[in-house]
Image (spheres, coloured by chain):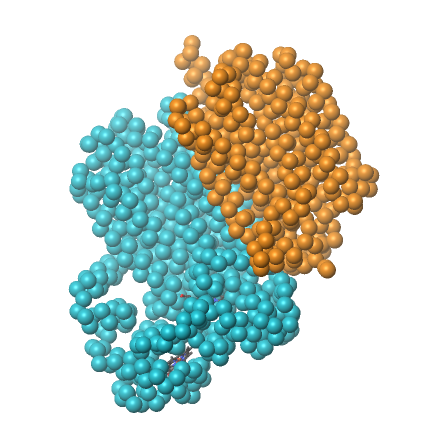
Amino acid sequence: MNYPVWVTEVGGNFYIALISIFHVYIAHFAIGGGIFLVLTEHYAYRKNDTRLLDYLKLHSKFFALVTLVAGALSGVGIWFVVSLVSPTGISALIRVYVWAWAIEWVLFFVEIIASIAYYSSWNTISRKRHLTIGWIYVVTGILSLAVINGIITFMLTPGEWIETKNITDGFFNPTYKPSLFLRFFICISLAGIYALFTTVTLKDKETRAKLLRYASIWAIVGALMTIPGFRWYFSLLPEGSEEMLLLGGMPIAQNAYDILTFAGVLLIIFLLVPLFIPRKFHWSLTILIAAFALSVFGAAEWIRETIRRPYVIYDYLYGNNLRIDEYENVQRKGGILKNALWVKEKDVLNINAGKDIFRIACRSCHTLNGYNALAPPFGKIEEEYIYAIIGKLKHLRGKMPPLAATEEEKLILAKYLYESGKKISQTEKTGHEVFEKRCTFCHTKDKYNGLYDSFEGEELESIRDSIPILDEMAEEMVPWFGNDDEADLLAKYIHSWYLEKKPSSKKMDKEKKIEEDENNDDDTTEEEESEETDDSEDEEE
Amino acid sequence: MNAIIPAPDQLAIPGPFWLFQVLLVFTFLLHVLTMNALLGGSIIAVVSYFRGKVDKNHQKLAKTIYSYLPTVIATAVSFGVAPLLFVQLIYGQFFYTSSIILGGIWLSVVLFIIFAYYSSYFMKFNHEKKINIAKYVSFSAPILFLIVASIFANNLSILEKPLKWYDLYFKSIESGENPMFHDTIIYLRLTHVLLGAIALTGIWIFLIGYFNRNKDENWSVWAKSYGLKIFLFSTLLNIVAGTLYLMAQPREIMLLFMGKNITLSILFILSLIITGFLLYITYRRKNEKFQKKEMIIITSVFSLLLLFMLIIRHQVRAAYLKDYFKLEALKFESQDGMMALFFIFFLIGTAVVAYIIKTAVFYKQKTENKKKN
């Protein structure tokens, strides 16, 4: 409302996620890798192991080149991109925490100087001084994590701050500790994983094997410790997060969660190779392992970004730069076009007004054709249906801020979205397609807002009869806009659910898998098994 | 048409306004020192890199600059973070708007710096080797930094002109019109900055020469005079560029320099006098040996000039935003504990950095000297 909206067809949130993932992957290494270097340096001096020292010299240069440049700048990059997507959010973070940011800046500067000095002074200064510089790096690194962690967790769980506006309340918020714990072990794990990169290049077979084993211990211990870390962290997330992660309340978050668990298991399995058979370790495995680690920790970051929806700062600011307390004002004072500053078309009957409204109310999270796109799902459905959906945004899968628009504004927004929709004129051939077109905006089969139980035990006839009058069954429902053919197909599809065996565990079964099960596909069972193993592993911890 | 200015954040600014202004100018000074060195340094390094194929002096200069450049970039980046923080704190409603108008272009700054940074590391490790691609890579840092500089110049120019925002924004999102260089004055601004960067690099080279006087006498004399020559010529050109830049300003702004704003006018006149003085002594003495005293005079007077320029710049921005920036609209609520904590960290941090530099640089020189003897 206050700021212009950055228009990008790729998607602002996509850029945020991409840069954050890239950044955390390096920034955690920047901290863990420092610890790794200094502790290993101590060890090498004690054993007077010159081969190990040579390795450390090599690794510290690699470390500096990765963290100083890509690490530091991608951090700046997050800041840049967030200020484009959520200027109000970043402004609030700076107003509240400017001194913390300034402290972070001091730490950042010391870290950089220490890192440059560390990698370039192996041969020129005494061992003792070199270690001192190393320890300075480690301490400032951990301190900087402790500072930034307070600000990041604040966005998701601001805790008491909402009431008190007290900086300590906001900083040491409910997820501060678990997040710090979790991130610390991500650092340790990544330290080991990155060490594989330099270790595989070593010529001497014995040193190589010894170091591979050593690095993999760091990686595995770190990775295993993140499991209780994740659990602790997840247990303190805002209400409703679990639905989004496990039950498909928000498809994007659920996908990220699946990637997290799946790649996590693979990561640990593959890390066993350098641990137990280091001599057989081929360099290409490093790339695989690094890719799994990127998927795990990247997915974790993606989850953190998405389950915060619809907020940028929980309970304070919505994702479209509208403060919660502003929302009612806008509603009362005549809607979006009247209240927003950056409006081109003031005439609510002109289709361009729809464009303005879309930009102001939805663009911060959606695009037309890029990330979280609206043209594809809206291209398939009727204008009236779009209008009905817009009126029920809070019931959709994927949390959305309430829409502060007037009725006229909703109409023109629907019209605009309808006309921008990707028109696909093919008629739906299967009931599943009808289901996806008309129902999965808000329902799943048997998870989030699942329909399995609602129709259980009903005959095909009665399912078919209820479809056109669904909006009478529940007030929150949208009316039926489909034709008779679609209704027939949908009814048959829903009825077919009860012809299969009843899903054993709601969490495990995805619609797709059930369909594949029918073909008795071997791969699926294997996949399910591996998912089960990872769950049981979770429980062991 | 009236300007559209987003309302400033309702949350309080946690400290006194003057303090943040001082921090802004101070940290920006640090940034400008290092940023100019990397911009000018990367340009002069390329020149010396190519001339170095036939000229030993240039070869050594290229080597020296390339060995420093990555560290200079690292410091410039970290010094840049602080002013960016403080400018967002007090001028957020302007800064975010101008950044959003630039949009993806603004974001690309980060990518350009990463590439420039890696390419300067590449040059550091490879400039002496006979590899062909070094020839091409050598151009990337200066070109990328120039692009970055122009994006910054554009952002800060847009920031100062709220009246243009509406058109720039809607033209760029609707017809994809590029908001860069919407006004020719930005070219002048960029030229002024660029020549300043080269002048600063001249002083830097002079200092490098000075501090190497005991190691390599001949080269030191050459470097000192080469540095001052660079300073002299770029500053002469910059007087022209600066005058043009001043004349291209809107009338109200120009009048401020002509006596309407007393501090601004005094600073302006002082800057002119200082520049004249610097030009005079560098011209008179460019081929002679320098005493420590003169070295100190040149550097400190030059730093003073830079500081004046920054204060002028800050004042001009304030003048541009006079009608739009309302101090009364900001809330202040000091966080004294946090403020104290920051200064403690700042002091300790400075001491630690001093310790590291002392150990890594000076201790290293000692061992090097020992090895030689």
Viewer-proximal residue among A185 and A120: A120
| Closest to the observer, A375 or B330 | A375
| Chain letter of the cyan region | A
Left-right relation of A55 to A318: left
Location of residue A54 (image quadrant): top left
For this orientation, the residue located farthest to the right is B259
Rendered-image quadrant of the N terminus of chain B: bottom right
Q: Is there any visible trace of residue B238 in the rendered image?
A: yes
Quadrant location of the C terminus of chain B? top left
Report the residue at 34% width, 29% height from top.
Answer: A57
Can residue A316 be seen here?
no
Q: Residue at x 48, y 37 (%)?
A: B116
- A467 or A185, which lies in front? A467
Query: Could you tell me which residue is drawn at 34 percent across and 69 percent down?
Result: A247
Residue that sits furthest to the top in the current view: B373
Q: Residue B76: x, y in percent?
A: 54, 36
In percent of width and height, residue B51 lies at 51, 21
Give the chain ID for the orange colour. Answer: B
Q: Quadrant of residue A67?
A: top left
The foreground one among A293 and B190 is B190
> How far from the left and from the top, in percent, is residue A292?
30, 50
